[in-house]
Amino acid sequence: MQKLKIGVLASGSGSNLQAIIDEAAAGLLPVEIVMVLSDKPDAYALTRAEQAGIMTAVVLPKDYATREEYDARVVKLLTLAGAEAVALAGYLRIVTKTLLDAFPGRVLNIHPALLPAFPGLHGQRQAFEYGVKVAGCTVHFVDEGLDSGPIILQAPVPVLDDDDEETLTARILQQEHIIYPLALKLLAEGKLTVEGRKVRISD
């Protein structure tokens, strides 16, 4: 089976990136990461990519007047690398129509909450402080809104009585590392169909 070539955008440590790298290396995920791109030159995700022999790039927001100009540069680099789809993995920028139009229906994101609850930054903290009994994570298609695109997969994580934000975040992250590679596998295998707000998974 031909592998889906993806670009990964990351701003931080890149643990979800590592999960994708590991699954692909084990032959469990039919994707090839052709580039890891970051808006932060010190993101550890770049180190993870380099250790795996993956091409990296840094695009600094301060060098561009608008978000659209920034994304145009990102699109150019991803396209030159051969990317067919894009995975956001701890990427702390809202992407624009410029990027979405370049990869229609092929931009995914992982969010550490059960959307549509607690979008935006620190979903785990928001859920913990709200006092929910069940937290979790969501993989969704990206649209122009804030964590508002059609939902592909979700994983619930019970909030334990002795949890704090740190322990809850760690358990949510374990589930992120499971469902994000799975969502990318479904995308690569052509098993995802979007009908309005619903994502149908074939087979």
Image: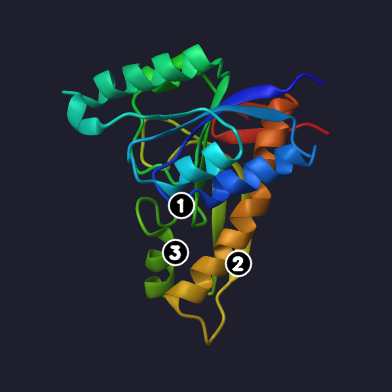
Which callout, 1 or 3, points to the residue nearer the camera? 1
Quarter of the figure with residue 202: top right
Q: Are marks 2 and 1 in contact (CB under 8 Å)?
A: no
Residue for point 72% across, 43% down: 23
Residue for point 19% across, 26% down: 63
- Chain-order first, disc 1 or disc 3: 1
**Residue 131: % across, % down:** 43, 76
Which residue is labeled 1 in the image?
A: 13
- Chain-order first, disc 2 or disc 1: 1
User: Quadrant where the N terminus lies?
Assistant: top right
Question: Residue 157 has which mark?
Answer: 2
Element under label 3?
helix
Quarter of the figure with residue 91: top left
Residue for point 43% across, 22% down: 100
How crowded is the residue under tag 1: few (<14 C-alpha within 10 Å), some, or many (20+)? some
Q: Nearer the viewer, residue 158 or 195?
A: 158
Q: Nearer the viewer, residue 196 or 17?
A: 17
Which residue is labeled 3 in the image?
A: 124
Q: Is residue 180 visible?
A: no
User: Quadrant where the C terminus lies?
Assistant: top right
- Chain-order first, disc 3 or disc 2: 3
User: For the residues marked 1 and 3, what is the alpha-carbon distance in whole angstroms?
Assistant: 17 Å
Residue type, label 2: Val
Residue type, label 1: Ser
Element under label 1?
loop
Residue for point 32% across, 29% down: 59
Residue type, label 3: Gln
How crowded is the residue under tag 2: few (<14 C-alpha within 10 Å), some, or many (20+)? many
**Residue 15: % across, % down:** 54, 52
Element under label 2?
strand
User: For the residues marked 3 and 2, what is the alpha-carbon distance in whole angstroms?
Assistant: 11 Å
